[in-house]
Amino acid sequence: MSNRHPRILILTAGFGDGHLQVSSALLHYFHAQQVNQVQIIDLMREAHPVLNSFFSKVYQMSSFTSQLGFDYYGWSYYMTRDSNPSGPVMRYLNGFVKPKMLETISRFRPDAVINTFPFGVVSPRECVHAARTFTVITDYALHSRWIHPDTYAYYVATNEIKDMMVQNYDGLAGKISVTGIPVRPQFYSAAAEAPLRRAAQGMTKGKRILIMAGTFTVFQQLVELIHLLVDQEVGEITVVCGRKQQAYEKLTTLFSDQPQVNILGYVKNIHDLMAASSCIVTKAGGITLSEAVILKLPIFILSPYGGQERENARYFKNHGMAQISSNVRQLADQLRHFLGAPVISDRIRGNMAEFHKGTAGELIVNDILMTLQNHQDANHDYELVLRP
């Protein structure tokens, strides 16, 4: 590594877009520091493409099966939440990707390996090329799968997670920084413009509900919610279907005669939509919640399924930044009440402003680069001492 050209390897996963978005955010902030030798790798997809496709489908189905009482993902999450990070379960899970990980490190020879997904850490003793490992925890809840004895530093979302790590695992007190979860820079730009947009929106007495269609595992629930909101005349309703083309086509047909209902497919400027909205109905993924905090956008969550999403939702509810509903009618009532009481919106936005940690991606990248520089300086001083 030279002073200006460290080599960075970012490990991610394609289970949902969240881990990929965190990786993209980190890439941006490394480039902003003129660090251009950065590689992002979906480790599971590279190591076992067929198995990765299977696991991805199983993960996507888990939200649907949980609605039927078969919450296999939630069960596995809670069963292993407090497992020994060095025990057989975690060793087995890491074993899926370890050979590919060792191969990638040997080929790319990174100075730093950054985990945005909880598997893939390997011991320096197993590598021909030694690299420091950093972990960015992308949830508002702690699970043992994130912990590895050879991780040099952890970046976490909250003080509560840091406290739990220190209490439950020896030797971590000096390794943890509370930075928040990295999000893409577009959200900070949109946040700067959001007050003006909302002021203009208030002048026209308009209320805008942003609904992420992926929140709904049962399509008919989404249709029911839109009908309830239309009947209540709450204001403008925007539904983002993402890559669900079939849902987009059906909703476009069903609500073609409702001018206050806007149905969108995949959008690149989701940050602009969020900034112009009064609230968002979404799943409780750590990255989406972090984006909403930056934009001070009140959050509504429908029946979060077991695992990190349920824990994320509970954390946000307990800190006055989100409301949770158990069924569609309750959700519609919550939205109606919220839109009719500006004091609730002001309170939630205030809680979010107090909670916001700063530009997480920038903080993390600067800390990693400083660590690498200090390590290089220490090695240089050691070489000078030994030089005859």
Image (cartoon, grey):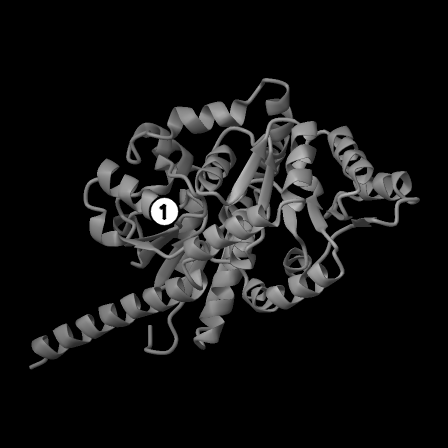
| Residue 278 drawn at (x, y percent) | 65, 52
Look at the image and tell me whether residue 19 can be seen: no
Q: Nearer the viewer, residue 378 or 321?
A: 321
What residue sits 42% from the left and 49% below the top? 101
Q: Is residue 222 left or right of residue 131?
A: right
User: In the rendered image of this protein, does residue 358 appear above or below residue 380?
Assistant: above
Q: Residues within 10 Å of mark 1 (few under 14, many from 20)?
A: many
Q: Nearer the viewer, residue 106 or 53?
A: 53
| Residue 30 drawn at (x, y percent) | 45, 69
Secondary structure at numbered mark 1: loop
Q: Is residue 128 left or right of residue 245?
A: left
Q: Is residue 9 left or right of residue 15?
A: left
Q: Nearer the viewer, residue 171 or 301?
A: 301
Three-letter code, disc 1: Val
Q: Residue furthest right?
A: 257
| Residue 50 drawn at (x, y percent) | 60, 38
Look at the image and tell me whether residue 72 can be seen: yes
Which image quarter is the C terminus in?
A: bottom left
Which image quarter is the N terminus in?
A: bottom left
Q: Is residue 54 left or right of residue 385?
A: right
Residue picked out by circle 1: 121
| Residue 153 drawn at (x, y percent) | 30, 54
How many numbered badges does the structure rendering display? 1
